[in-house]
Image (tube, rainbow, N blue to C red):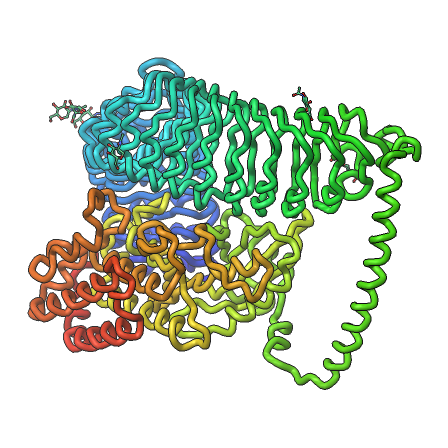
């Protein structure tokens, strides 16, 4: 890591052609002497802390090809000469504090440009019409500035893969604002079209149906009208459609069910009408579906229960009617929220609701639901927010709700509930409680949420009494409860007797326990007690207050931050869990201790943990891992997934993993699994092996992360160190990587991990993910590779590997690769017991690697000299 200022004398190295000092901690100004590096073709100063303005002298770098100043704190106006450097193919000024206009002739002066980004600055004025003349552009990112006016025709940009214009003031709020989208009709490789948060008016552009590679379409927060075109069903590559907060009308096309790759569909805040098409159940990869604030009607389709990846569903504020289909409650990973409020739903709340054990928020308010509150609702143990107000629920508040210990907000107002307010409500850490306008009776508790008159609403229940004085209820006088007194007295006597007995038992136990303790020797569990617990404050400091700058990833179980620990300045990765269960502390620390005791060169090391409460008084739990400088395998295999692509990643071969690196990674992961399965005491099943869980250190050694996390979390959630329960579907891996038998309810097993490993192996060498759009109709990744073996291997290889193969040793290399793929294929057979086991796999792969080693040295030399530039 370089620190301090860039020395001005650097400018005297006139022969320098390539200067990459990006990603350091450099401060101060860019010395103007850099302009003297007249041979320079590549200059990367990105991701430092450089300040001040860009020196005019950079405009003298007449041989410069790629200039990357991304991610600094540069300010002021960009020297106009920079835009005259006609050999530039990549120019990244993104994420700085730059201002001014883009020059009107930009596209004429920079004809070679393939990558251009000024995203996240303070540029103003219009997008120059000449931009279309820069017809090699592949990536154009102007998002998050103050640009305005009409977007010019982009018809010559036929190679565009990414157009990001979001968060500007573009468009005049006039019909015709979207003409530029039609002008892109020949840009058939467009993958990302991001124009949300502008002033665009017009109708939903049909042209998007011509973008046969489109992955992200985001149009939200404009003034776009018209219908969603039926032809959208042909854009099978779509993964994300954001079109919320516009004025779209008409129906949701039935063909939406053909978009098998869709993960996110955000259409809330429009004027869509008609029914929700049944075909939506075909979208098994969809994770978030938001259709609220429209005019949708009819029944909620029960086929939604087939959207097995849904983790958030919002259908609120529509005109939906009839009963809630119970299938909705079978959604295995519905965790974030289910909002059906503000409709005309009738009937009772199905018993099945209790299956949503990991759900955070449930809102059924403002409907016409009736009947009892099902006692199974107590099964939704993760609930923080529960709103059932404004219905016609009857009967008492069920006792089973005392399981909802994580509730922060509870609203049952405007129903027809009767009976007493259960005592357990005062033991919840509620921040808001609304039981108003029911028929509740009896004494109001006075502890917990009831101790503050402004956080507990209970008015409109004429038969309540007692509580804190501020509630101004009548006191529960004896006469009032005359009928109840006798049974209550009896109860009191009974309770007293039980208490006395319990006390005796406890005393006896304490005595025996103490006695034993004196003779007991320290054991392993004492070690676990000593497992260091880092404080919340320490982690808060390490991550700059959990700032978004430090956020490096997020997943099913929580979010990951990069942090620097004060004590020894070591960089760590901090995984913050989302767990609602209180009192899980002890088992959490014990489990962390167990995780820490599992050590292997290819497993991500758990450094320590934190179990504490945050400043809001909520439970806070985090695991601290060693930091992996080279990110995840996912980032390397699919760099196009990251939201901001960097110049150096576009045409830079060195960013790809070569054949040998891939083999090394495969062997590393195989050894890690072999260790988990057979050599660390109890056999540990990973459960969720996939590229994003494989991390690469600064020497590109692979470390498997999140091992055993699924089971670990279950134990913590259940607060039961002996729990071996693995039935929760939510933790059974990720679609595409989880073996088929998990889908039909089989126990997790080491065979399942072997399957996931096989898929991973196939992905590493073909570059295709198991969920790729091409795999449907019975053709899986497994089948795709199996069919090509042994003759057509070269056709299915990741194309960037082909050049690594072609050498004098090509035949030999191909043969070895074929044997790797054969192993992968036999790891991914349907029948679990027919799969190899990890120790065999590891042994075979490592012997193949040794055979490669023979030819490796000479090839390595070739790769290093062949592809740079
Ligand atoms: C684009 O290039 C053509 C040919 O060089 C030129 O005539 C035209 O004026 C340019 N367009 C803009 C808007 O600068
Ligand atoms: C697309 O290409 C065709 C054929 O080259 C051309 O006729 C048409 O005008 C182009 N469309 C746009 C919008 O540029
Ligand atoms: C766009 O798609 C429509 C049909 O969906 C087709 O008729 C038209 O030719 C396409 N345009 C281009 C430029 O490919
Ligand atoms: C939904 O999937 C079924 C079978 O998987 C298929 O027959 C049907 O055409 C699909 N529906 C739509 C609208 O894509
Ligand atoms: C409220 O519930 C009671 C029974 O608990 C029932 O008699 C009454 O009709 C209900 N009121 C309404 C408006 O449904
Ligand atoms: C009572 O609750 C209100 C809002 O919920 C809060 O502002 C206030 O500080 C609380 N008062 C006490 C004494 O906790």
Closer to the camera, 152 or 229?
Answer: 229
| Number of marks in picture | 0
Q: For residue 717, which quarter of the picture?
A: bottom right
| Residue 58, placed above or below residue 825 | above
Residue 458 in sight here? yes
Which quarter of the rendered picture does the C terminus lie within?
bottom left
Closer to the camera, 349 or 594?
Answer: 349
Across and down, in percent, residue 390 comes to 62, 24
What residue do we see at 18% from left, 29% from top? 186
What residue do we see at 59% from left, 62% from top? 720
| Residue 298, placed above or below residue 535 | above
| Residue 215, placed above or below residue 275 | below
Taking 548 as reference, is 847 left or right?
Answer: left
Closer to the camera, 41 or 433?
Answer: 433
| Residue 34, placed above or below residue 216 | below
Q: For residue 661, which quarter of the picture?
A: bottom left
Which quarter of the rendered picture does the N terminus lie within?
bottom left
Across and down, in percent, residue 471 comes to 83, 30
Across and down, in percent, residue 169 comes to 42, 24
Closer to the camera, 233 or 434?
Answer: 434
Image quarter where ligand 6 lies: top right
Across and down, in percent, residue 516 comes to 73, 81
What residue do we see at 34% from left, 69% from top? 701
What residue do we see at 34% from left, 28% from top? 278
Residue 81 in sight here? no
């Amino acid at each position: 890591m370089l620190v301090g200022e860039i020395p001005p004398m650097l400018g005297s190295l006139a022969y320098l052609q390539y200067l990459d000092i990006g990603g350091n901690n450099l401060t101060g100004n860019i010395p103007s002497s850099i302009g003297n590096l007249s041979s320079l073709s590549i200059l990367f100063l990105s991701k430092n802390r450089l300040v001040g303005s860009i020196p005019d002298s950079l405009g003298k770098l007449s041989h410069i090809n790629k200039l990357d100043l991304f991610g600094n704190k540069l300010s002021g106006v960009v020297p106009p000469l920079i835009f005259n450097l006609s050999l530039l193919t990549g120019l990244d000024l993104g994420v700085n504090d730059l201002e001014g206009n883009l020059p009107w002739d930009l596209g004429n002066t920079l004809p070679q440009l393939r990558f251009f980004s000024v995203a996240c600055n303070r540029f103003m004025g219009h997008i120059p019409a000449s931009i279309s003349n820069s017809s090699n552009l592949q990536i154009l990112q102007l998002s998050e500035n103050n640009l305005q006016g009409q977007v010019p025709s982009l018809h010559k940009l036929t190679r565009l893969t990414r157009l990001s214009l979001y968060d500007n003031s573009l468009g005049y709020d006039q019909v015709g604002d979207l003409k530029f989208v039609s002008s892109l009709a020949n840009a058939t490789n467009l993958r990302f079209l991001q124009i949300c948060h502008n002033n665009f008016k017009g109708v939903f552009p049909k042209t998007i149906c011509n973008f046969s590679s489109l992955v992200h379409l985001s149009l939200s927060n404009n003034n776009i009208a018209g219908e969603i075109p039926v032809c959208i069903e042909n854009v099978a590559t779509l993964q994300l459609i954001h079109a919320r907060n516009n004025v779209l009308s008409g129906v949701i096309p039935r063909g939406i069910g053909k978009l098998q790759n869709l993960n996110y569909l955000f259409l809330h805040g429009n004027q869509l009408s008609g029914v929700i098409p049944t075909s939506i159940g075909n979208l098994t990869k969809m994770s978030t579906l938001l259709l609220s604030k429209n005019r949708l009607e009819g029944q909620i389709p029960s086929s939604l229960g087939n959207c097995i990846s849904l983790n958030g569903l919002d259908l609120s504020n529509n005109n939906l009617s009839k009963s809630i289909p119970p299938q909705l409650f079978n959604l295995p990973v519905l965790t974030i929220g289910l909002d059906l409020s503000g409709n005309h739903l009738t009937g009772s709340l199905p018993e099945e609701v209790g299956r949503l054990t990991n759900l955070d928020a449930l809102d059924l308010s403002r409907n016409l639901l009736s009947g009892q509150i099902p006692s199974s609702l107590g099964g939704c143990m993760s609930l923080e927010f529960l709103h059932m107000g404004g219905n016609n629920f009857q009967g008492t508040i069920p006792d089973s709700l005392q399981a909802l210990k994580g509730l922060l907000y509870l609203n049952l107002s405007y129903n027809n509930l009767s009976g007493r307010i259960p005592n357990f409500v005062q033991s919840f850490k509620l921040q808001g409680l609304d039981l108003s306008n029911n028929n509740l009776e009896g004494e109001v508790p006075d502890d917990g949420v009831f101790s503050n008159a402004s956080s507990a609403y209970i008015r409109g229940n004429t038969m309540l009494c007692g509580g804190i004085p501020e509630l101004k209820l009548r006191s529960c006088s004896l006469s009032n409860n005359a009928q109840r007194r006798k049974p209550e007295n009896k109860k009191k006597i009974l309770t007293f007797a039980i208490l006395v007995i319990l006390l005796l038992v406890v005393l006896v136990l304490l005595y025996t326990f103490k006695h034993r303790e004196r003779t007991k020797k320290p054991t392993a569990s004492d070690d676990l007690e000593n497992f260091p617990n880092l404080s919340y404050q320490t982690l808060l400091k390490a991550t700059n207050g959990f700032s978004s700058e430090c956020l490096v990833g997020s997943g099913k179980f929580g979010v990951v931050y990069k942090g620097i620990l004060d004590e020894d300045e070591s960089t760590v990765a901090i995984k913050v869990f989302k767990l609602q269960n209180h009192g899980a502390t002890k088992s959490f620390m014990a489990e962390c201790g167990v995780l820490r005791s599992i050590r292997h060169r290819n497993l991500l090391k758990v450094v320590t943990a934190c179990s504490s409460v945050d400043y809001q008084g909520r439970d806070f739990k985090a695991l601290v891992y060693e930091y992996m400088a080279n990110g995840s395998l996912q980032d390397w295999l699919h760099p196009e997934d990251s939201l901001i692509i960097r110049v150096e990643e576009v045409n830079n071969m060195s960013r790809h993993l070569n054949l040998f690196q891939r083999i090394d990674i495969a062997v590393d992961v195989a050894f890690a699994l072999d260790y988990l399965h057979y050599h660390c005491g109890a056999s540990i099943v990973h459960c969720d092996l996939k590229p994003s869980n494989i991390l690469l250190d600064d020497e590109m050694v692979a470390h498997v992360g999140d091992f055993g996390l699924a089971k670990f979390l279950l134990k913590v959630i259940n607060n039961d160190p002996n729990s071996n329960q693995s039935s929760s579907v939510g933790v059974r891996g990720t679609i595409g990587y989880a073996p088929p038998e998990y889908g039909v309810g089989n126990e997790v097993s080491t065979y399942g991990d072997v399957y996931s490993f096989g898929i991973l192996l196939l992905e590493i060498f073909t570059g295709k993910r198991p969920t790729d759009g091409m795999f449907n109709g019975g053709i899986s990744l497994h089948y795709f590779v199996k069919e090509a073996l042994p003759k057509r291997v070269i056709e299915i290889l990741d194309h960037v590997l082909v050049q690594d193969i072609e050498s004098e040793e090509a035949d030999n290399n191909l043969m070895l690769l074929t044997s790797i793929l054969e192993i992968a294929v036999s790891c991914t057979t349907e029948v679990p017991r027919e799969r190899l086991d990890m120790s065999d796999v590891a042994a075979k792969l490592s012997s193949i690697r040794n055979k490669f080693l023979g030819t490796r040295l000479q090839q390595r030399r070739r790769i290093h000299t062949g592809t740079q530039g």
